[in-house]
């Protein structure tokens, strides 16, 4: 019997500093802890996810750049992490990939093709999580074309949702042109301070303005999120993984897993 196709989530928000990378890592580690085979894909030339999972971007011989531009297969670039999920890492070379892809036919499908090739080569992942760059360029469109669903981390501050409308327009365009099955799962509130009415007001405004689902529970603000990358570990591993934020991400992972059977 053929292996079931992986569930692919794009974690996207064109605004930086909204805990997008933290959300991708935390959901991936939590899904791994539930017994699933998980691949994390770093699509940001700043390589924050790669660094945060203990891999030196400057020491990589093969990265997602070579995979997207056709030089190597994804299997050649994947590395293991201490936290559990496999990682398709990035480095600064990825900054040149966007310009290279712009000149190519079918540029929007480069990532989908690489992941399809990976599956055909025998890599059986249950979940693939794509950490998108903080822009709506070719790399983000590649992620949206490859994904089944989009999750939007949203910082609970007044100006944080200014780019949500543009992201939703891009999702609508991708649905029309390259991925009719793409679905917006919803917004994950990050850096949430439940002691203030401001955070709650921001979420209510986003839900009403854009008609999107707000995924519960919110991720509480914590200094632990800033400390974890320095250790090269996720928030679910550093500090014993006992923070409120870690517990919230575990709840989200259980919801994402739904009724899917474990692959291991």
Image (cartoon, rainbow, N blue to C red):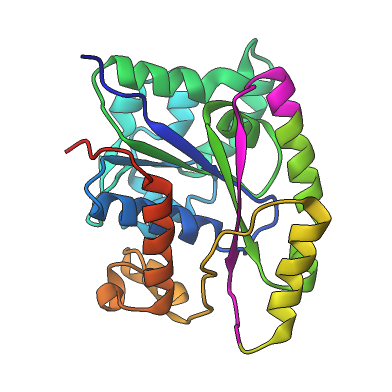
Q: Nearer the viewer, residue 261 or 234?
A: 261
The residue at the far left in this view is 264
Quarter of the view holding residue 27: bottom left
Percent x, y of residue 6: 37, 30
Q: Residue at x 33, y 32 (%)?
A: 77
**Is residue 55 visible in this depiction of the protein?**
no
Give 214 or 33, whichever is nearer the viewer.
214
Magenta segment: 173-194
Residue 195 picture quarter: bottom right
Based on the picture, tell me whether residue 56 belongs to the magenta stretch: no
Q: Position of residue 107 (x, y in %)?
A: 62, 18
Q: Is residue 185 visible from the viewing direction of this image? A: yes
Q: Farthest residue toward the bottom?
A: 195
Dividing the image into 4 quarters, which one contains the N terminus?
Answer: top left
Q: Residue at x 25, y 52 (%)?
A: 34
In the picture, measured across the screen, residue 16 lies left or right of residue 162, that is left
Write down the quadrant of residue 233 in the picture: bottom left
Residue, far top: 105
Pick the residue in front: 17 or 191: 191
| Vertical order, 139 against 104 (above or below) | below
- The residue lying at 26 percent from left, 25 percent from top is 123
In the displayed structure, 113 sits above or below 212; it is above
Q: Is residue 150 above or below residue 252?
A: above
Q: Position of residue 153 (x, y in %)?
A: 59, 58
Q: For the point 75% across and 32% down, which residue is it?
A: 172
**Residue 138, x across and y down, in percent:** 66, 30
Quadrant of the frame with the C terminus: top left
Q: Is residue 74 left or right of residue 97?
A: left
């Amino acid at each position: 019997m053929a292996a079931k196709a992986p569930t692919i989530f794009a974690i996207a928000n064109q605004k930086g500093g909204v805990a997008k990378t933290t959300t991708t890592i935390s959901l991936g580690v939590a899904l791994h802890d539930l017994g699933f085979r998980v691949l994390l894909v770093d699509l940001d030339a700043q390589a924050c996810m790669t660094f945060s999972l203990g891999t030196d971007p400057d020491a990589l011989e093969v990265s997602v750049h070579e995979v997207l531009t056709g030089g190597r297969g994804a299997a050649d670039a994947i590395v293991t992490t201490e936290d559990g999920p496999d990682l398709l890492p990035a480095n600064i070379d990825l900054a040149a990939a966007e310009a290279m892809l712009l000149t190519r036919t079918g540029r929007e499908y480069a990532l989908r093709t690489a992941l399809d090739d990976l599956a055909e080569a025998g890599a059986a992942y249950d979940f693939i999580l794509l950490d998108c760059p903080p822009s709506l360029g070719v790399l983000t469109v590649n992620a949206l074309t490859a994904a089944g669903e989009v999750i939007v981390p949203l910082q609970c501050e007044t100006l944080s949702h200014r780019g949500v409308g543009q992201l939703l327009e891009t999702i609508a365009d991708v649905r029309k042109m390259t991925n009719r099955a793409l679905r917006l799962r919803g917004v994950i509130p990050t850096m949430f301070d439940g002691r203030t009415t401001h955070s709650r007001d921001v979420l209510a405004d986003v839900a009403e303005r854009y008609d999107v689902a707000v995924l519960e529970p919110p991720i509480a603000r914590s200094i632990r999120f800033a400390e974890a990358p320095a250790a090269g570990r996720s928030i679910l591993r550093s500090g014993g993984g006992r923070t409120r934020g870690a517990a919230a991400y575990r709840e989200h992972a259980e919801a994402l897993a739904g009724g899917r059977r474990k692959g291991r």
